[in-house]
DNA sequence: CCTAAATACTTCACCGATGAATTATTTTTC
DNA sequence: GAAAAATAATTCATCGGTGAAGTATTTAGG
């Protein structure tokens, strides 16, 4: 999804604002400000994910593969089980199998059965995997930092706090829906 | 991607906070607060998109199909070309063809060649398509509203303003990268 | 101790998304 | 006016993601 590179997020948002003004007139009770926030969130998040995907593509790596590798890189001893990873990387166990296959093939991780529970697999990052991460990350930092550079430190804190509040709210609403 | 229904966003974030504390020690110059904001954004946005996907699934409709239909619903005369839609719905023209096929099959839109330019197709929402939208939306409003209910009106305005600022920033950084 | 239930991971079939190539049409260039 | 270039949409092949079903192992219950 590298569509944002051709279209400005701001222009998409402008078009959405127009459309929403019209819909507001014809759909009773629509929480228009909440819909707008939803769209702003998903559009900005999507655009940033696209940027990441573009950075990964020359290395022949997909986003979810990268996230899984990053999780291993940042775990206490560079290892984790597929189900643990699936949780934090928000992937199905099916796709985690595909990801593990891919990373093993690249030599970035190893895979072995756990000793204490032979149902479990232990994925462990290799030195090559660590080197790849260490080489891949630094060039991405300047643009990521630039993206948030218009915010003051105080605004960043505010945004972070609000997103954490939103995450809690999402969990609360989701739990309510499961009853 | 309905993974969030099984895992709490807040727990995923907690795990990420741990991992990031470790990575911060071993990757020099990493803009840790910006990475954290990126993850918070993509996780919350992703969780909300999952909620939408779950709502659409019983109706046999995918998110992008829904968004395209909503765009037509909210356009001045219920019509648009595939390339226009592709832009605002952030989809490739390839996928817009798939989406159009799907919506035509459901009877929600019609498709015809433009008179003034036979390269162009005009997609137009049908009365059945309008009825579907009018029936589908209202049940989603309460939970969407509940998700943002913890924010005061002032906070919502702040969040909206910040996300618009972020969108502009993304466009600026993207334009810089294209040079 | 044995059986049923639960768990971890994988396989299979399918869905949604993409880029490259293609076709038809329009616009631009000379 | 003719040819080249550009544009709009579609087709084809491939990738990344899922749920259901299946296999192997462990845990729970009687």
Image: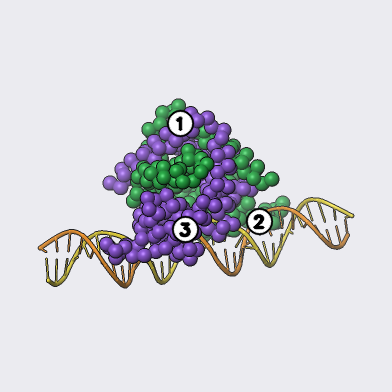
Chain colours: A green, B purple, C orange, D yellow
On screen, residue A32 above or below B115: above
Does residue B38 appear in this view? Answer: no
Q: Is residue C19 left or right of residue A175?
A: left
Q: Are marks 2 and 1 on the same chain?
A: no
- In 3D space, how far apart are the residues under numbered discs 2 and 1 (Cα atoms)? 50 Å
Dot 1: what SS? helix
Marker disc for residue A113: 2
Which is more N-terminal, label 1 or label 3? 3
Q: Which residue is mark 1?
A: B158
Label 2–label 1 contact, CB within 8 A: no
Label 3–label 1 contact, CB within 8 A: no
Q: Which numbered mark, 2 or 3, is in the foreground of this view?
A: 3
Q: Position of residue B160 (x, y in %)?
A: 44, 35
Q: What crowding class fits label 2: few (fewer than 14 Cα within 10 Å), some (14-19), or many (20 or more)? A: few
Q: Which residue appears at 39% of the width and 64% of the height?
A: B111
Marker disc for residue A79: none
The residue nearer to you, when weighing A40 against B59, is B59
Q: Which numbered mark, 2 or 1, is in the foreground of this view?
A: 1
Q: Is residue B5 left or right of residue B131?
A: right
Q: Quadrant of the N terminus of chain A?
A: bottom left
Q: Which numbered mark, 3 or 1, is in the foreground of this view?
A: 3
Q: Which residue appears at 62% of the width and 39% of the height?
A: A172
Q: Position of residue D6 (x, y in %)?
A: 24, 59
């Amino acid at each position: 999804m590298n569509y944002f590179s051709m279209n400005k997020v701001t222009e998409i948002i402008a078009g959405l604002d127009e459309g929403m003004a019209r819909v507001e007139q014809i759909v009773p009770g629509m929480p228009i400000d909440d819909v707008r926030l939803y769209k702003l969130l998903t559009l900005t998040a999507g655009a940033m994910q696209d940027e990441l995907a573009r950075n990964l593509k020359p290395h022949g790596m997909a986003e979810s593969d990268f996230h899984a590798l990053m999780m291993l890189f940042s775990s206490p001893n560079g290892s984790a089980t597929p189900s643990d990873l699936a949780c934090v990387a928000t992937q199905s166990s099916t796709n985690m199998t595909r990801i593990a296959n891919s990373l093993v093939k690249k030599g970035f991780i190893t895979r072995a059965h756990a000793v204490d529970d032979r149902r479990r697999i232990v994925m462990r990052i290799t030195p090559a995997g660590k080197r790849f991460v260490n080489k891949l990350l630094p060039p991405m930092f300047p643009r990521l930092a630039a993206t948030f550079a218009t915010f003051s430190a105080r605004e960043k804190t505010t945004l972070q706090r609000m997103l954490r509040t939103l995450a809690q709210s999402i969990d609360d609403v989701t739990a309510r829906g499961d009853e």
